[in-house]
């Protein structure tokens, strides 16, 4: 078994062979991946050492102390948090070798083609069709709310391959080249003024069967792995005590005593306690993740994260009073990622509204918590045994 001492030795060897101060960033990332120090819990040859996930922090601390470059997790978060674990779990050896290295080293950015305008929060009701044509699949349909599609080279894509069976059984999962003919990306301008989301239109896009992930008709099973990892990635983000959105409000509270009122003080204390509780629960969730695959518990953390962000950003606006009504920049931009802490209070307040929608709506996640965590009876369903083509739309 890999030990802390072994990991430190491997890091020292990497730093000696590729000094951070003189090695180009891309070359260092390539070397780190090849040394098995990218994600150490992945198998050897795929950027890892087959070591416990809990020891990743040892590698990260050693490299950070040496001033070594890291990949930009905001820019490639979907690839790291969703595409990579799904490819590892269901991909072929050829898919592992083709996709994981350029994903981690930032050569290829990924997005997620799941949501559709006609399916709402019911992912299994999606209608984007994939029809087999020899060694290819021809895909036609529309996806929406696709973060970062305008800067992505690849996408994880769920399609409808069999409309004659119930909706959960007729889906197939693909890896889609975003530069392929027939892929069109259009910006969706948000209430913040930016367009980090997109609409994606697929018009007879040809995808090789070699880029299918999992068996035909098992797209729902593959997608569940993606979604569970997504909720952990969103809600289980590591941040320090008095950090995150609550930390922004407490900083203003300390620096601006003239804004304080007793009512705001009570509400801030309540939010601080909730933030600390969420931090500890998220830490526990990451420890559980280190011991195995993510489960439905990630849904609870994601719901709590969304509610806390929205409450904290709203309290910040109230604390600032008239100042909170200002907005720094309505310029239409297509950013590389979301930066809650790099903009003013107005941006944080507006952008936080999306937290309870993206990554699974809070309503759907509460159903998951009730049924799969608490073991409560499921809601009555009349569509589980009906062929997708016969469902009302």
Image (spheres, rainbow, N blue to C red):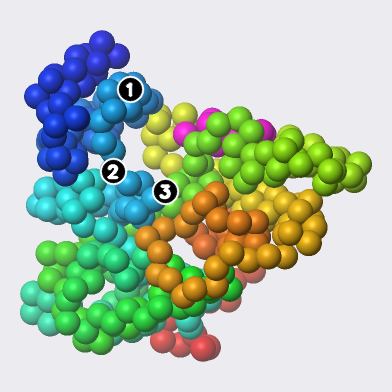
Q: Nearer the viewer, mark 2 or mark 1?
A: 1
**Residue at left offset 32%, top offset 71%:** 150
Which residue is the site of mark 3?
A: 229
Choose top left, top right, bottom left or bottom right for residue 121.
Answer: bottom right
Q: Is residue 308 visible?
A: yes
**Residue at left offset 36%, top offset 46%:** 73
Q: Secondary structure at mark 1?
A: helix
Counting from the top left corner in percent of width and height, residue 141 is at 33, 84
- Report if residue 195 lies within the magenta region: no
Q: Secondary structure at mark 2?
A: loop
Which residue is the site of mark 2?
A: 71
The magenta region covers 276-286
Q: Residue furthest top?
A: 5
Asked whether, in this view, residue 306 is left or right of residue 35, the answer is right
Crowd tier of the residue under label 1, counting other residues whose Cα lies within 10 Å: few below 14, some 14–19, many 20 or above:
few
User: Mark 1 or mark 3: which comes first in sequence?
Assistant: 1
Numbered mark located on residue 65 in the image: 1
């Amino acid at each position: 078994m890999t030990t802390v001492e072994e990991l430190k030795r491997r890091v020292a060897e990497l730093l000696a062979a590729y000094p951070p101060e003189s090695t180009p960033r891309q070359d260092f990332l390539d070397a780190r991946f090849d040394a098995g120090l990218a994600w150490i819990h992945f198998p050897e040859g795929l950027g890892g050492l087959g070591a416990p996930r809990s020891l990743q922090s040892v590698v990260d601390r050693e490299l950070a102390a040496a001033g070594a470059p890291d990949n930009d997790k905001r820019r490639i978060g979907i690839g790291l948090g969703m595409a990579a674990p799904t490819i590892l779990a269901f991909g072929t050896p050829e898919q592992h070798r083709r996709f994981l290295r350029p994903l981690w080293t930032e050569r290829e950015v990924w997005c997620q083609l799941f949501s559709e305008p006609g399916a709402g929060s019911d992912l299994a009701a999606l209608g984007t069709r994939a029809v087999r044509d020899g060694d290819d699949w021809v895909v036609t349909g529309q996806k929406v709310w696709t973060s970062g599609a305008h800067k992505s080279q690849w996408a994880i894509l769920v399609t409808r391959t069999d409309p004659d069976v119930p909706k959960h059984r007729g889906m197939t999962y693909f890896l889609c080249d975003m530069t392929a003919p027939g892929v069109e990306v259009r910006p969706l301008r948000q209430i913040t003024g930016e367009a980090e989301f997109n609409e994606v239109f697929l018009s007879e896009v040809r995808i090789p069967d070699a880029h299918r992930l999992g068996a035909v008709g098992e797209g729902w099973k593959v997608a569940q792995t993606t979604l569970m990892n997504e909720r952990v990635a969103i809600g289980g983000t590591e941040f320090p005590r008095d950090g995150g959105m609550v930390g922004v409000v407490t900083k203003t509270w300390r620096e601006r005593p003239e804004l304080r009122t007793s009512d705001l003080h009570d509400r801030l204390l309540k939010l601080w306690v909730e933030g600390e509780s969420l931090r500890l629960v998220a830490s526990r969730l990451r420890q559980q993740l280190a011991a195995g695959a993510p489960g439905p518990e990630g849904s609870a953390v994601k719901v709590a994260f969304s509610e806390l962000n929205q409450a904290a950003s709203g309290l910040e606006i109230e604390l600032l009073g008239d100042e909170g009504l200002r907005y720094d920049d309505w310029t239409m931009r297509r950013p590389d990622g979301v930066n809650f802490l790099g903009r003013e209070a107005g941006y944080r307040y507006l952008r936080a509204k999306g937290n309870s929608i993206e990554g699974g709506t809070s309503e759907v996640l509460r159903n998951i918590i009730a049924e799969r965590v608490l073991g409560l009876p499921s809601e009555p369903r009349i569509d589980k045994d009906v062929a997708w083509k016969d469902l009302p739309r």
